[in-house]
Every structure is written in C-alpha cells, then in structure tokens.
Image (spheres, helix red, strand yellow):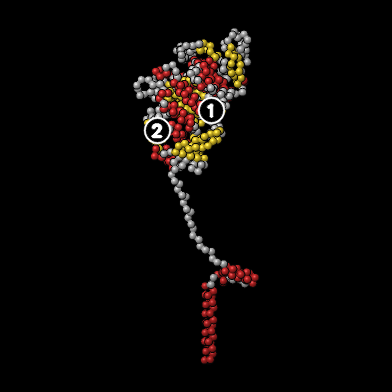
Amino acid sequence: MKRFTALLLCFVMILTLLAGCKQEEKKNSLDEPREKVEKKKEDPKETKEKETEKATKDTEPEPEQTEEVEPEPEPELPDVPAVFYYTEYSDRANRVGEVMEYHTIRPDDLQVKSFKNSKGEEIKYISYLNSSWYVEEALLDTADLLMEYYSFETLEEVVECLECDGLKIYTAVDPAAQEIVENYFTDSSNFTTVGSSDVQPQASMVITDPETGDIIALVGGRGPKGYDVLNYATEVTRQPGSSIKPLSVYGPALEEGVITYGSIYEDSPYNKETGWPKNYPEGYKGSTQIYDAVRRSVNTIAVKVLMSMGASKSFDFLKSVGISSLVAMKDSDNNDHNAAALALGGMVYGVSNRELTEAYQVLANEGSFSDGRTVVKIADRDDNVIIDNSGSAVQVMSAETSSIMTVMLEDVVDNGTADDITLNDKIAVAGKTGTSNNMYDKWFVGYTPYYVGGVWFGFEKPKNLDAYVKGENPAVTIWEGVMTELHEAKVFTNADYQKEFIYSENMVEASVCRSSGKLAASSCSSVEKHSYFNKNLLPTDTCAGH
C-alpha cells in the first residue's frame, strides 16, 4: 500500500513537470516573430538564391551620405546708367550702318518733377539737367515705351530703370542734322529782333525722314537749350491755319473723288449773310480751279470743298495721320468737327509742330504713313532687344493722290505763298504756309525727295506778329536756311542725288478747260495744259468750247 501511494505521487509529479515544459514552449513561441512561427518548408533552390543574395548585399559598401548644397544666389548686377546710341547709316531704309554712342545718362541729373496745369491737375514729368533738345525728347519717348513694356505705375520706376539697368537705347537722330538745326537756332542773327524787349518770338523745327518715320533732328526753341524750358516743338499746340489744308481738305477730297486737280469752285463767301470766310489778302475771284485755290491758299474754296466732302471724312483722316489734339463732337460742344477748325485750321487746341510735320510724311512718301519716332529700339545691357519700336508704314492714301497733292504743293513753292524759297533751284520742294487768326502764328511745312521739315514761329503767349513779319513769313525763312545747309551737307555731296519727286505711274497729265473743268476742246480759249489726274478718275467729258 505504501509502495502504491509512493508510485502514484511520482506519476503525478512527472505529469506536472511535463505540463510546465509545454507551457514554457508555448510562451517562447509567442515571443518569436510571426513569420518565423508561420515559416513553411522552403525549396532548397530558393534557399540557395536567397543566401547568395544576402552574401552579395553583405559585401556591397553602404552608400555615402551626401549633404544637400544650396545653390549660390545670382550675383547682383552693378548699377549702370542707360546709354543712347545712333547709327551712321549706309542704308537708312534698311537700317544698315555703324552704331555709335550718342549720350550716356547722368543719374544725378535725372529726377521726377511736377507742375499744375490750367485745370489744377498735378502733372508729373521727367526732368533732365542740361540735356539737348533731342536727348530730352528721346528720354520722354523712352519713358513712355518703358511704362508700357514693364507696366510701371510711376515715373520714379522709370528713372530707377534708366539709372541702374544698363539699357541700350537706339535713337533715330542724325547728329549732323541736329547740329545744323541747333547752330541755326542759337544764332540770334537768323531772327528778326524788334524793340528792346527781352520777350521776342519763339520758334521750333522738326525734321523727319518720311520713308522711315525717323525724327532725325528737333529743336524746341531759340537760343541755347535751357533747363526745364518749354519745348515749342512738342509741348505746345497752336492753330495751324492754312498749313492743315492739304491734310484736312484737299488730300482726302482727292482720295474720295470729290474733286480733281481741275475742279472748279466759286471763290465767294460760304455764308453770304456774314461774308464768312474772308480771304487773305481780301477779295474774291469767282470761278477758280482747285490747283489755283491751293496755290493762293483761298479760304472760301477750302470751306466749300470740306462741306462737299463732309467734316467726318476730314476729321477721321487727320486722326489716321497722327493728329491727336483734335476734339471730337461727342467730347465737347466746343469741338473741331466744323469748317472753321478743319478747313481753316482754327482748332480748339491746335496741333504740335511734331505731329503736323509727321503727318506731312504721307504726302512725301506715296501715301504711306509712319508714326514719327526718336527711339527705334531698346535693348538690355546684353544687347537683347526688349522693345522694338521700328514700326511699319500704313497706306492711308493712294500714291496717285499723294502725287497730285505734291504737284500742287510744288506750285505753292514755285509760284504761290512760299515763293521766297530758293532751294527749289537745286532740288524739288513742295510745302504749305499757314497763318493763324490775328497773325498769332506762322507756319511752313515743306518737303524734298529726302526730308520733311516743319517750322513754327510765334510768341509763348500769343500776340500779333505784324512787326516781325514785314511782308515775309519767318517760318519760310527759317526753313530755307536750315534745309539748304542740310541738303548741302547730306545730299548735294552726291553728284547723282535725286532732284525730282517720283510720281505714281498712275498719275496722268491732261489739258483742261479753265472755265468748265472738263477736258479741253480745240475751241477752248483758256486751257490749263498741265493738269494731273488719277487715271481712274480722269474726266470723260469734253468741253463744248468757249
């Protein structure tokens, strides 16, 4: 019995030990990674591949840790002022030639200033100490181009750009032409002086190349160029008088077929009750052909032709050739949509010398108009062009019309109101004089096969010029002096220079009866043998005879 009890105790102890071993084994299995617990029997081939892969990885060097390097900041460019250039052209039309430095901006002399206009509005502008007339105008044109290109909101931003960014500004100036004009205007002996008063009449001149629209020379006043003085070529607008007629009346009317070279109008007041308008010199000559009305600058016929054509066509044409100072009917009761303004030049604000001279390019360039410019292009300091202002010409009038108009304006110089000019002895000259109301302003805009030149003469505060005129037009005298010297320096040095205008091949010549305006018959007693027509508008009726 004792033996049985002892055996039973031993058996229980053995069972207890076995149970403890299984519990420990289970605990150990739970502590191992899951993939090891669930490990399946592997294929010997896979096992070998894995061992090889592991051995390869163990022998590969670990990649080196590289530090991230921040890119170096762009170096700041030094502050460099803008430089103006010009070109010594061997072929101006195609802009071929050697580029030369003209002027470097002096940053210390550049600032933004302001003034209050007649309406009390503050007007800001860029002031440049002791600059030439041309540099000053080119600077203002550059500012306009930069404002648009960079969307600048203030002129201060423009000034900073000119002072620091090293811009290269290519101008249209011809330094030789500019020097000729400046020398003429600084020589007081070229101007009539009346009395002992320091207040003498002022004058301005603009010269362009009509083929390109380039303003090659510009002077805004008499005497040495002062600081912050008024530029009478660009900043002042004055009534142009009869100098506007070729652009506002006769040119558009020829283009529209309203008139021909030989059309006949009655030289008599348009308004018979008031006797308006009057002619200067006074008097009326009855039946008059168009070419004679242009030559003598007959006011009555200019008004009648305008009314035959319609003021709107005149107004629109002037806008198409860059006259920006016109006042439209919708803008004011006191506007330029009327005969006094368009036919006689009595505009509300007048026109600037620069814009009037630029507009005449359409007559000198076969009906093609280019916006006048002092700046051709602007490049950055590396000479990459950022603004191309070379532009392109727009045909606003037929070559036939401009040719006929030029023939009539040649007659103005040969036999009309500008017959004091002598340059036409060497080269063809066409142009038109102008006088505003009360003899306040004198004008002459004329052209040759090479250049267009416009001259204004008058007081800063308008007053009568009778004492300074003495039977002559000072604007014609100035034009003759400057343009003669310019052609001697730049044109007549070439023995083969172009002496005559080139007319359209579609301009034809015919004989016209002076009494009827029809093609002349053998029985007509008064015949204009040299009348000029667009061949498509040649009169078809022959006069019955007189």
Residue situated furthest left in the rendering: 196
Q: Amino acid at mark 1?
A: Thr
Residue ID for mark 2 = 123
Q: Image quarter for residue 530?
A: top right
Q: How far apart are the two marked residues, 1 and 2, measured between alpha carbons?
A: 46 Å
Residue placed most toward the observer, 51 or 402:
402
Which residue is rendered at x = 41% and y = 39% of the image? Answer: 106
Q: Amino acid at mark 2?
A: Ile
Q: How many marks?
A: 2
Which residue is rendered at x = 56% and y = 15% of the image? Answer: 263
Disc 2 crowd rating (10 Å Cα; few below 14, some 14-19, many 20+) is few
Looking at the image, residue 59 lies above or below residue 128: below
Residue 476 in view of the camera: yes
Which residue is rendered at x = 42% and y = 23% of the image? Answer: 190
On the rendered structure, is 234 left or right of 448? left
Residue 234 in view of the camera: no
Return the x and y of residue 287 as percentages of the image width and height.
53, 11
